[in-house]
Amino acid sequence: MTTRPDVISFVGDTLKENLTVTGAVMAHIFAGTSASDLDLIVKLIDVYPCFDSNEKLMSQYELPVAMEVFRGRFRKSFKTPEPMIPGKPEEFVIDLHQINHTFLQGHRLMIQIQSTWFPIIDRNPQKYVPNIFEAKDDDFTKATHTIYCNSQYSTYIEIPVMKE
């Protein structure tokens, strides 16, 4: 689990049987920002049991099995970026790519959504600028991002489960 304020975690119940996920994993995230741009990093994580008697060193380990970053400016088109409207919830469909992974009995699934992955990816100034690589120091601004999880804006992960 994380204590970072820019990370939200959703953790499922302990699995009563193995769960094999094979195929394309898609995240449907409803998010908004107080600024005009944001980054969303989505991770699907295999959480090992609190105490793994078979592999004690793996107890509570969080194994990322799918991850992707998505910049808000490209939510409608990769060809034509545009600023976000502050306070407006919007849907982001994020392809976490193909996976083939079995979450073992006793493990849990975790979804993490965060707003930065620096230094793995460059920093987003949070303020829409035509070219992020030409952002000036005063373009970088503090922003509050909101992930929506309600009946109107339903954030979820689509995973293809293989029947055994």
Image (cartoon, rainbow, N blue to C red):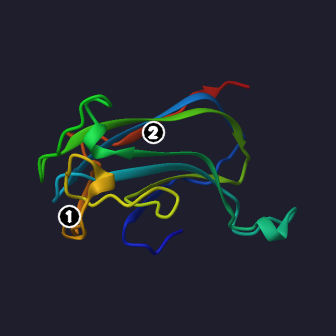
* Residue 61 horizontal/vertical position (percent): 69, 64
Left-right relation of 8 to 24: left
- Left or right: where 14 falls relative to 87: right
SS type, badge 1? helix
Could you tell me how far apart the alpha carbons at marks 2 and 1 are, in whole angstroms? Answer: 33 Å
Residue 12's spot in the image, x, y percent? 53, 52
Q: Which residue is mark 2?
A: 157
- The numbered mark at residue 139 is 1
Contact check, label 2 and label 1, Cβ < 8 Å: no
**What residue is shown at x 37% (from left), y 51% (from top)?**
40
In the rendered structure, the answer to whether residue 129 lies left or right of residue 25 reads left
Q: Amino acid at mark 1?
A: Asp
Q: Earlier in the sequence, mark 2 or mark 1?
A: 1
Would you place residue 144 above or below residue 4 in this image? Answer: above
**Where is 97 relative to 155, above or below?**
above
Quarter location, residue 140:
bottom left
In percent of the image, x 24 and y 37: which residue is there? 81
Front residue of 164/59: it is 59
Instruction: Count neighbours of disc 2 (C-alpha within 10 A) and say few if under 14, some if 14 to 19, many if 20 or more.
Output: some
Query: Dividing the image into 4 quarters, which one contains the C terminus?
Result: top right
Q: Which marked residue is nearer to the observer: mark 2 or mark 1?
A: 1
Q: Nearer the viewer, residue 80 or 64?
A: 80
The quadrant in which residue 101 appears is: top right
From the viewer's perspective, is residue 142 above or below residue 37?
A: below
Q: Quadrant of the N terminus?
A: bottom right
Give coordinates of residue 159: x percent, y percent: 53, 33
Q: Is residue 125 left or right of residue 67?
A: left
